[in-house]
Amino acid sequence: MTKLKTTLFGSLALAAVAALASGSATLADHHGAPATAKVGEAAPDFTLTCTDGKAHTLSDYTKDGKIVVLEWFNVGCPFVVKHHERHRTMSTLAKDFKDKDVVWLAVVSSAPGTQGHGLELNREYKKKWEIAYPILIDEPGKVGRAYEARTTPHMYIIDKTGTLVYAGAIDNNRSATELGDVNYVRQALKQVVAGETVTESMTRPYGCSVKYAD
């Protein structure tokens, strides 16, 4: 019996290490049930590892009074290229709000063998596009599915209380090259920083489909 318990414990420990290495995350609400993101409710907590190997936990930021922006990311998607290479939408916004207690995190939910997958690839583009914020790896897609992220980019804002207050598009132009005249994320961030209610809390996201595993 002792040998069986030891073997079982060792197997579980190895599984836990493997899960962490693959960038997976355990998501649950306060009652222990699987969590799904809904605007106006607590955002599902998660821990993911970024391209430099550091673990990032959502609740650590909100406990510190930070507002968190999540950006679903895929370097091969023309709409991501639009906002990182053709224009500096994301990096400019992250820089503009950095000193206002706003943390920006990109999330890659591309499965192995799909567009945008790969640690080295994302490291390369982080440097190429001079992205100053972390790119988190969600290879199994658990975090992406919990947030029901459908496109790259798909944007989310979580306020200091851990409540999801915005979900949707970055702006109002669905072109793969041109910017819109309304940036929904900038608009929402201004309101959140000012302690106001987000007036446009949900919009229709646009971009490439998130490349989840089948």
Image: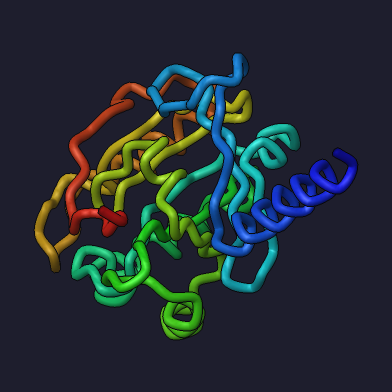
Q: Can you see residue 34?
A: yes
Residue 46 image offset from top left, x and y in percent: 58, 41
Q: Is residue 198 above or below residue 133?
A: above
> Residue at position x 72%, y 40% from top?
60
> Residue at position x 39%, y 34% from top?
188
Q: Nearer the viewer, residue 20 or 119?
A: 20
150 displayed left or right of 185? left
Residue 123 image offset from top left, x and y in percent: 51, 79
Q: Is residue 61 above or below residue 124?
A: above
119 displayed left or right of 38? right
> Residue at position x 23%, y 44% from top?
182
195 displayed left or right of 198? right
Q: Residue furthest right?
A: 2
Residue 90 picture quarter: bottom left
Q: Can you see residue 81?
A: no
Residue 197 image offset from top left, x and y in percent: 43, 19
Residue 76 image offset from top left, x and y in percent: 26, 74
